[in-house]
């Protein structure tokens, strides 16, 4: 864990996967936060606790899209084609 020291900024790098900003700083530097989000996720903290993440629109689209459709999901199941008996439960 390394801290990027700058007299004006209190932004820190906790690892290579994201950059962390205090809320006040993120508000003041919103343009930079958004530009940086194009490269890697930007974490916003409130009172020292991680509160929000800003990601690029492309990353959002990747997260939003299903990896596969429901049919392919069930077809790739190790239970596909298995003859399973499921007893009925009476509540």
Image: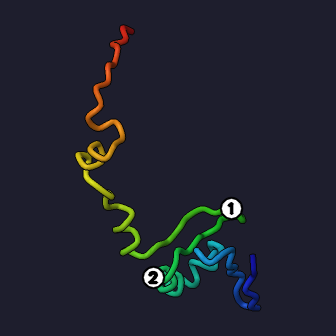
The picture places residue 30, in percent across and down from the top left corner, at 52, 82
Residue 32: mark: none
Foreground mark, 2 or 1, reads 2
Residue lying at the far top in this picture: please name it.
Answer: 90
Q: Is residue 18 left or right of 54 when viewed as pictured?
A: right
Residue lying at the far bottom in this picture: please name it.
Answer: 7
Q: Is residue 36 left or right of 70 when viewed as pictured?
A: right
The picture places residue 33, in percent across and down from the top left corner, at 53, 82
- Whole-number angstrom distance, CA of label 2 to CA of label 1: 23 Å
- Quadrant location of the N terminus? bottom right
Of the image marks 2 and 1, the number of the one nearer the N terminus:
2
Residue 49: mark: 1
Q: Is residue 7 left or right of 19 when viewed as pictured?
A: right
- Residue denoted by label 2: 38
The picture places residue 59, in percent across and down from the top left corner, at 40, 72
Question: Dot 2 surroundings within 10 Å: few (below 14), some, or many (20 or more)?
Answer: some
Towards the viewer: 62 or 25: 62
Towards the viewer: 60 or 70: 70
Q: Relative to 22, is 51 above or below?
A: above
Secondary structure under the numbered disc 1 in the rendered image: strand
Quadrant in which residue 56 is drawn: bottom left
Quadrant in which residue 66 is drawn: bottom left
């Amino acid at each position: 864990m390394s801290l990027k020291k700058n007299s004006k900024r209190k932004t820190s790098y906790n690892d290579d996967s994201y950059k962390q900003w205090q809320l006040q700083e993120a508000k003041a530097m919103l343009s930079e936060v958004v530009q940086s989000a194009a490269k890697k996720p930007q974490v916003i903290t409130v009172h020292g606790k991680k509160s929000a993440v800003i990601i690029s629109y492309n990353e959002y689209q990747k997260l939003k899209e299903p990896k596969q459709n429901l049919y392919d999901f069930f077809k790739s199941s190790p239970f596909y084609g298995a003859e399973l008996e499921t007893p009925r439960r009476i509540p």
